[in-house]
């Protein structure tokens, strides 16, 4: 089974700087990690490879520093890493990002399954995975909590719902996005870390992918950020003490006072 796992490197801190001209995150010089949900995607890809054989290719789009995320994925058991990086891709929204990643996947060639994390911690849109499947015109199943069965032609999964789950069977190739309930990411072994350190990271640029210039970066992003700001810190407030019924009564009085 040939598996492609799409990951994203995100800021480790919530205190990020914004470029005032483009209204995009300034990632240079900020300590970054693999998006937490993508760790589960990597682990699931490696587990499926261990069960069915094949290859796990990890794909990310970002600046040169995203190389570290790919090496970490390789240390967990992925076979190779591909970095999609070019100044032309800067400022991409979820639509342009999914278009670019889909172009990179077409360049990779044949695959059976694409795995993405449910969403990224910096954007929280959960749109890139479904966007990739749309550009590639393949089936998608989101919020997957368990892979029940997989063959060369189909996959049966449990999809998490607000109340319970549903079982979905999809033909392959397909794309799934996974939630944290699906597994527990492994700690890289010393052998894995050594292999990752010496691994050759493949690089794709706009020239390699030959994408439509009007569909990438800021030009290809229909989502326009008009303004970004940090909400002012709230001050004041009070701590209510006492028995629960007394606290509830005091809270009701306070709310009534605010309303009036």
Image: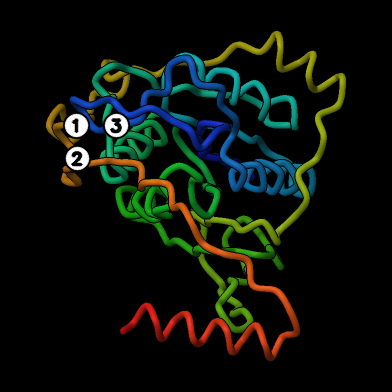
Instruction: Give the image quarter of residue 203.
Output: top left
- Tell me: residue 88, above or below residue 59: above
Residue 47 picture location, percent across and down: 75, 46
Q: Foreground: 238 or 178?
A: 238
Left or right, 246 with respect to 175, comes to right
Instruction: Give the image quarter of residue 55.
Output: top right
Left or right, 241 with respect to 230, comes to right
Q: Foreground: 143 or 139?
A: 143
User: Which residue ends up furthest to the top in the rendered image?
Assistant: 198
Q: Residues within 10 Å of mark 1 (few under 14, many from 20)?
A: some
Q: Earlier in the sequence, mark 3 or mark 1?
A: 3
The residue at which mark 3 appears reads as: 24
The residue at which mark 2 appears reads as: 221
- Tell me: residue 189, above or below residue 241: above
Instruction: Give the image quarter of residue 88.
Output: top left
Q: Separation of disc 3 and disc 1 at Cα?
A: 10 Å
Q: Separation of disc 2 and disc 3 at Cα?
A: 12 Å
CB under 8 Å between discs 2 and 1: yes
Question: Which residue occupies 24% across, 23% down?
Answer: 210
The residue at which mark 1 appears reads as: 218
Question: Which residue occupies 22% across, 28% down?
Answer: 211
Name the colour scheme.
rainbow
* Quadrant in which the C terminus appears: bottom left
The number of numbered badges drawn on the structure is: 3
Q: Residues within 10 Å of mark 3 (few under 14, many from 20)?
A: some
* Quadrant in which the N terminus appears: top right
Q: Residues within 10 Å of mark 2 (few under 14, many from 20)?
A: some
Residue 258 picture location, percent across and down: 37, 77
Q: Foreground: 150 or 33?
A: 33
At mark 1, the secondary structure is loop
Q: Earlier in the sequence, mark 2 or mark 3?
A: 3
Question: Which residue occupies 43% across, 47% down?
Answer: 233
């Amino acid at each position: 089974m040939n598996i492609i796992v799409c990951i994203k490197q995100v800021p480790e801190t919530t205190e990020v700087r914004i470029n005032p001209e483009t209204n995009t995150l300034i990632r240079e010089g900020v300590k970054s990690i693999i998006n937490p949900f993508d760790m589960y995607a990597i682990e699931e890809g490696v587990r499926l490879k261990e069960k069915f054989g094949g290859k796990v290719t990890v794909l990310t789009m970002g600046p040169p520093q995203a190389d570290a995320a790919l090496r970490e994925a390789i240390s967990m058991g992925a076979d190779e890493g591909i970095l999609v990086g070019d100044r032309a891709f800067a400022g991409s929204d979820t639509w342009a990002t999914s278009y670019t990643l889909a172009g990179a996947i077409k360049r990779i060639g044949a695959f059976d399954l694409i795995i993405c994390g449910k969403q990224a911690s910096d954007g929280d849109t959960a749109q890139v995975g479904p966007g990739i499947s749309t550009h590639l015109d393949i089936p998608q199943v989101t919020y997957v909590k368990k892979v029940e069965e997989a063959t060369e032609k189909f996959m049966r999964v449990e999809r998490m719902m607000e109340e319970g789950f549903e079982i979905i069977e999809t033909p392959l190739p397909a794309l799934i996005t996974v939630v944290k309930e699906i597994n527990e990411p492994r700690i890289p072994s010393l052998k894995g870390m050594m292999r990752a350190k010496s691994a050759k990271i493949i690089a794709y640029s706009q020239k390699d992918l030959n994408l439509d210039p009007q569909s990438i970066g800021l030009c290809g992003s229909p989502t326009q950020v008009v303004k970004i700001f940090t909400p002012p810190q709230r001050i004041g407030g009070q701590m209510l003490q006492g028995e629960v019924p007394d606290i509830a009564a005091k809270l009701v009085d306070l709310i009534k006072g605010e309303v009036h």
